[in-house]
Amino acid sequence: MPLPAGFANPLVVAIDRPDLASALSLAHRLRGVAGCFKLGLELFVAEGPAAVRAFTALRTPIFLDLKLHDIPNTVAAAVRRAAVLGPALLTVHASGGPAMLRAAAEAARSANSSMRLLAVTVLTSLDGEDLAAIGIEREPLAQAVHLARLAVACGIEGIVCSPAEIAAIRAAVGPEPILVVPGIRPEQSGLGDQKRTASPSQARAAGADLIVVGRPITAASDPVAAAEAILAQLEAAPAR
């Protein structure tokens, strides 16, 4: 599995910090170990685009995880604005529907940037009971595959899915789309609020292109050692 351009390794570290100073402090420690830094809603709401600009100075790829989900025109405008900030990856929700997905894909192409869009399928915090509660009768696997096919058909270049759906989604969408997999938990760590998880080596062996790890690294007493241990597991995994 070739890595996306500019990625030194498949480890994406979720920088879950509430302010830019602490986020940058953690990122500086992990620079050179992490293949990418993921910036999520908490930091973006707290610090805004300035946080993304500050991270681009580290010259490590940035995954801007905003999970955009709105009417097509609004999402397209947000995609164009995000592209100016220079992230390598940006998320939209596949459940936004075909018109929204097509508008997002066209906006990304017209932005004349290297940013790639990822469609979020089913959040790793959800299980079948959760989906039923919001009126979705499919089980998470079937729903994730359905949304992945839809997103790729609409021009989205990558998919975010749980470890449980990697093989089925790869079979459904083919070899080209990037598969980015959160819900990664080293064997010795707890699940937290994740329900559909796997170890780093299991996810990589199943066909994940990039794996996303947050608290098992960022909450560790030695984040660098925790990240290096995960990289060692990834290197030992037989990649498809």
Image (cartoon, grey):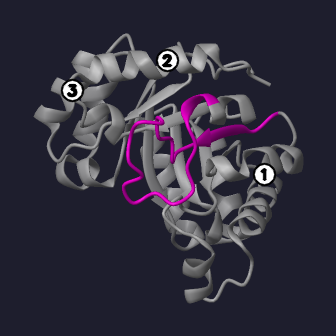
Circle 2: residue type:
Leu
Picture coordinates of residue 180, whole percent (x, y): 61, 40
Of 116 and 77, which appears nearest the observer?
116
Residue 109 image position (x, y, % from top left)? 66, 41
| Residue 27 badge | none
Residue of label 3:
26
The magenta segment: 176-201
- Nearest the eye: 113 or 60: 60
Q: Specify whether residue 80 is painted magenta.
A: no
Report the side of 176 relative to 109 (left or right).
right
Residue 93 visible somewhere in the drawing:
yes
Which mark sits nearer the N-terminus, 1 or 2?
Answer: 1
Q: Secondary structure at mark 1?
A: helix
Q: Image quadrant for the C terminus? A: top right
Label 2 Cα neighbours within 10 Å, binned few <14 / some 14-19 / many ≥20: many
Disc 3 residue type (three-letter): Leu
| Mark pair 3, 1: CA separation | 34 Å
Q: Quadrant of the N terminus?
A: top right
Residue at (37%, 15%) from the top-left corner?
59
Residue 152 image label: 1
User: Which residue lies most toward the left here?
Assistant: 21
Residue tagged by mark 2?
A: 231
